[in-house]
Image: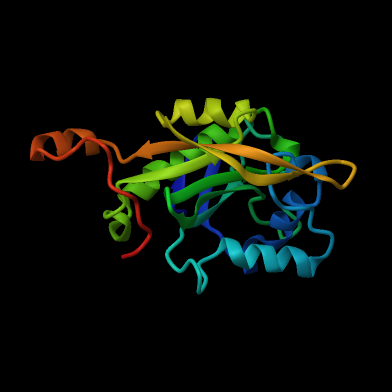
Amino acid sequence: MAYEAETPRLYLERLSIDKHFEDFWEMWTDPRSMVWSTQAPKRTAEEAKEWMLLQLPNEKNPNIDKFALLLKPSPANPQPWLNAKGEPKAIGVVGTNRDSPQGLETGYCINIAYWGHGYASEGFAAFLKLFWALEERQNVGFLVAKADPENFASARILEKSRARKGELLTGIWKRKLEDGQEQERDLICWIVDRPGIEERKAKDGEKTDPVRATSGT
C-alpha cells in the first residue's frame, strides 16, 4: 500500500474515521495524555468521534491537513505492530489544526504508551517535509505551534524542527487539574518557517518577517 510519507519507523497516512477511529479513541482515553491539552478524556465512542470530526477538514476549517502516524513492521518498534483490524497501528496524529490570528496552527498528539521514544520528533519532521511539498499549500509561508512554556518536551521537538520563538500569549488556555479545577496558562507561539523563505524574501527585497500564514487556497 502507498502512504503519503514514511520514516524509518513510521508511515504517514491521511487521517480518517473509517481507518483510524479505534486507535484515535485509545489516544484520548488516558487523562495523563491530556496534561498539555484543553481537552478532557473521551469516555464514550460518541465523544471521541465528535472530537475526531473536528480534527478533519470541516465547515469551520476546510483546509486543514491531518495525518495518522502508523507503526511500521520493524524490529525498532514495539509489538503489536497491527491494531485489532489487522492494519498498522496508529500511535499518533500530526498536522495542521486551524487558522488563527497568529497563523495556521500545527501540532501533534501521541498515544501515551509511546511517549519518550522519539516518535513525535520523527513524525513531526516527516509531516513538515510533506506539508511544504503539497501543491495546494504553497501559499503558506510559515506554521505556528503553540506550546505551554513548561512543556519542555514540545520545546525540544520544535527546536529540532528549527522553529523560532514568537510572541507569548498570556492566560490563553485553561489546564484541567486533578481536582476538577481549571488553571489559566500561557502559550508560546513557535514559528516554523517554510524552508528557504527568508532567502527568497531577501532576494526579492521583502521584509524578513513572514506574512501571516493562511490555510486558504
User: Residue 88: where, in percent of width, then height?
Assistant: 63, 51
Q: Residue at x 70, y 43 (%)?
A: 111
Query: Dividing the image into 4 quarters, which one contains the C terminus?
Result: bottom left
Position of 201 compared to 183: left or right? left
| Image x and y of residue 138, in percent | 27, 54
| Apparent side of residue 65 relative to residue 46 in the rendered image (left or right) | left
Relative side of 28 to 100, left or right: right
Res 118 seen here? no
Q: Residue furthest right?
A: 179
Q: How is the image coloured?
A: rainbow
Determine the image quadrant of residue 2: bottom left
Nearer-the-camera pick, 39 or 84? 39
Q: Quadrant of residue 127?
A: top left
Question: For the image shown, how many numbered marks are present on the structure?
Answer: 0
> In the image, 94: left or right of 117?
left
Q: Nearer the viewer, residue 193 or 21?
A: 193
Q: Is residue 78 visible?
A: yes
User: Foreground: 40 or 67?
Assistant: 40
Where is residue 141 shown, x and y percent of the image? Answer: 30, 47
Picture coordinates of residue 125 (x, y %)? 45, 36
Whether 141 is drawn above or below 119: the answer is below
Q: Return the residue nearer the eye: 159 or 38.
A: 38
